Image (cartoon, helix red, strand yellow):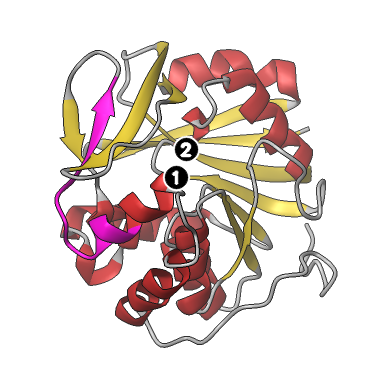
Amino acid sequence: MSESLGSDAVTTTTADTTGARTAVFAAENEAANIGDDVADAVLTRAIAGEPSWMQHSDGHRSELPTGRWMGGTWSTPQDRAFDEVILDACSGPTLDLGCGPGRFTAALTRFGTQAVGMDTCAAAVAMTRARGGCAVESDVLGPLPAAGRWSTVLLADGNVGIGGNLSLMLEQVADALEVGGRAVIEVDAPGTGHHYHRRRWHTDTIIGPWFPWVSVDADSLAAHAPAVRLQFTDHLSVGARHLVFATRH
């Protein structure tokens, strides 16, 4: 597999490496220039400590897992143990799709692994860069940097569900990977199947737009993988969270 993609892989450079809390303040400064971008505003306020929720189209809501997204001391011991498993699974140049505040992208960079995060949220990209990671503000279902040249593609935190189109997302994964490269994908609990729904983020003062999502377990993902040049290879559970691995052929 590739050892390095070279400097042409992306055109974005990293910012300072002053840590997660500095990253929050950097994101707040950038968010001030975002205007009416609701997702950026909600994420920034959530990480600053304002109560924030994920509203689901079936009527229930849950707290935004901002501690998990930030990682490190922001997260629980169980989440940190799961993150360690993911980091160990990322070998060679890694593309982190839906990187959020960049806990994986930044950690891999610190470990000397070439990593690039992608996210549509400008505040998340700003946080990733401030933590020392490289990130691009772009739709993960759009054009990919260095397509076909990544050793690992990571979809943590259920991000395989972005866009509500599982087949399209898996096509993106296959397009990003080099032949023999591996996808590391977090999925839902076994037996939960594959279903489409909508979500939105909100605080007490801001309500975001609905966006499509798909939830999928390991069996459902394995059923879709062969059609998009991916071969399901393994399934791993760590506590109450679950990973699947698929190889590009």
Q: Which residue is mark 1?
A: 156
Q: CA distance from mark 2 to mark 1?
A: 6 Å
In this rendering, position of residue 78 left or right of residue 108 = left
- Hey, what amino acid is under mark 2? Asn
Q: Residue, x 30% and y 17% (percent of image)?
A: 57
Q: How many marks?
A: 2
Q: Are marks 2 and 1 in contact (CB under 8 Å)?
A: yes
In this rendering, position of residue 202 left or right of residue 9 = left
In this rendering, position of residue 235 left or right of residue 145 = left
Residue found at the far front of this picture: 35
Image coords of residue 204 (percent x, y): 15, 43
Image coords of residue 115 (percent x, y): 62, 65
Q: Residue, x 51% and y 32% (percent of image)?
A: 162
Q: Which residue is mark 2?
A: 159
Image coords of residue 8 (percent x, y): 85, 69
Q: Residue, x 62% and y 29% (percent of image)?
A: 169
Q: Is residue 201 above or below residue 146?
A: above
In this rendering, position of residue 147 left or right of residue 112 = right
What element does badge 1 sit on?
A: loop
What element does badge 2 sit on?
A: helix
Crowd band around label 1 with a 10 angstrom C-alpha radius: few (<14), some (14–19), many (20+): many
Q: Does residue 245 appear in this view?
A: yes
Q: Which is nearer the eye, 196 or 239?
A: 196
45 in magenta: yes
- Hey, what amino acid is under mark 1? Ala
Which of the 4 image quarters holds residue 56? Answer: top left
**Image quadrant for the N terminus?**
bottom right
39 in magenta: no
Q: Which is nearer the eye, 51 or 165?
A: 51
Q: Does residue 231 appear in this view?
A: no
Crowd band around label 2 with a 10 angstrom C-alpha radius: few (<14), some (14–19), many (20+): many
Which residue range is magenta in the image?
44-56
